[in-house]
Image (spheres, rainbow, N blue to C red):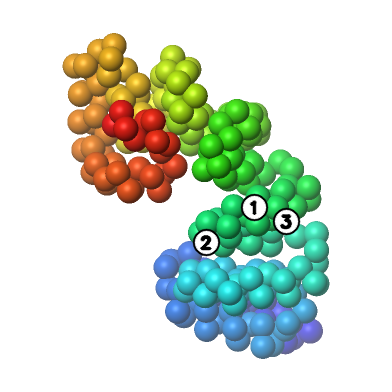
């Protein structure tokens, strides 16, 4: 029992180091915690997250499998798994993992949002919109989901609805992404305002100048071309 307590305390420290960006140290502590107690799914999850941070994705998948064997009803394991598959562009596996997690914990807005993002990547825009709405239903001020609805509407050439979404997102959080999205969407209506919003967006986050950065933020072909 003392060993178990000790392992959980070490696991907690590993998690804190992870949070502060000390990935190597976090991994070493997480390994130590598991060596003291390999019967706790939470420790396997912490180890997996430390492995993900150190880009040891294959090992992380194995740790998550070990955690799953102990407790197949821990939703975070599936969500962590989906984030690995997402980074490897294995969208079907990512989707499957998220859906499994959501059967256990359906009220998780971030997971629902992530599922919407996969539909966005797959160009299933109506499905994406429906899923983002579900995320917003769970968290009313979820500006990222509202913003991404704008991205989906733009690809469907529903520009008015895209404008509405970007404006709503800006009301919640004056972030560079909806500012630039709005600028692009109103370009044909009001060039001066579009330039104003673009300047504001790029001052806040100059990375949005880059085509590949916008692509990472899931900007589709049509809105990229207009930008």
Image location of residue 96, percent across then percent down: 70, 52
Mark closer to the observer (2, 3): 2
Instruction: Give whichever of 201, 61 is nearer the camera.
Output: 61
- Quick one: SS at disc 2? loop
Question: How many discs appear?
Answer: 3
- Quick one: SS at disc 3? helix
Residue beneath disc 3: 75
Residue lying at 53% horizontally and 56% vertically, measured from the top left: 89
Quote the CA–CA distance across marks 3 and 1.
18 Å
Taking 66 as reference, is 201 above or below it? above
- Quick one: SS at disc 1? helix
Describe residue 200's horizontal placement relative to residue 148 as left or right.
left
Residue lying at 40% horizontally and 48% vertically, measured from the top left: 216
Q: Which mark is residue 88?
A: 2
Q: Which mark is residue 92?
A: 1
In the current view of this chain or complex, which residue is farthest to the top? Answer: 189
């Amino acid at each position: 029992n003392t060993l178990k307590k000790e392992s959980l305390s070490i696991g907690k420290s590993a998690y804190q180091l992870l949070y502060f960006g000390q990935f190597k140290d976090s991994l070493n502590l997480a390994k130590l915690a598991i060596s003291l107690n390999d019967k706790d799914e939470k420790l396997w999850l912490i180890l997996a997250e430390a492995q993900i941070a150190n880009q040891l994705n294959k090992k992380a998948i194995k740790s998550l499998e070990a955690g799953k064997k102990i407790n197949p009803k821990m939703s975070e394991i599936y969500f962590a798994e989906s984030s690995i598959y997402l980074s490897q562009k294995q969208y079907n596996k990512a989707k499957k993992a998220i859906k499994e997690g959501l059967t256990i914990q359906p009220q998780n807005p971030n997971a629902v949002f992530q599922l919407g993002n996969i539909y966005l990547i797959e160009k299933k825009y109506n499905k994406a919109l429906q899923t983002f709405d579900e995320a917003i239903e769970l968290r009313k001020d979820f500006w990222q989901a509202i913003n991404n609805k704008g991205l989906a509407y733009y690809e469907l050439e529903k520009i008015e609805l895209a404008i509405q979404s970007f404006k709503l997102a800006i009301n919640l959080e004056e972030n560079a992404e909806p500012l630039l999205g709005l600028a692009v969407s109103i370009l044909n209506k009001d060039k001066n305002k579009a330039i104003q919003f673009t300047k504001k967006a790029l001052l806040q986050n100059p990375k949005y100048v880059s085509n590949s950065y916008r692509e990472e933020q899931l900007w589709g072909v049509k809105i990229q071309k207009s930008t």
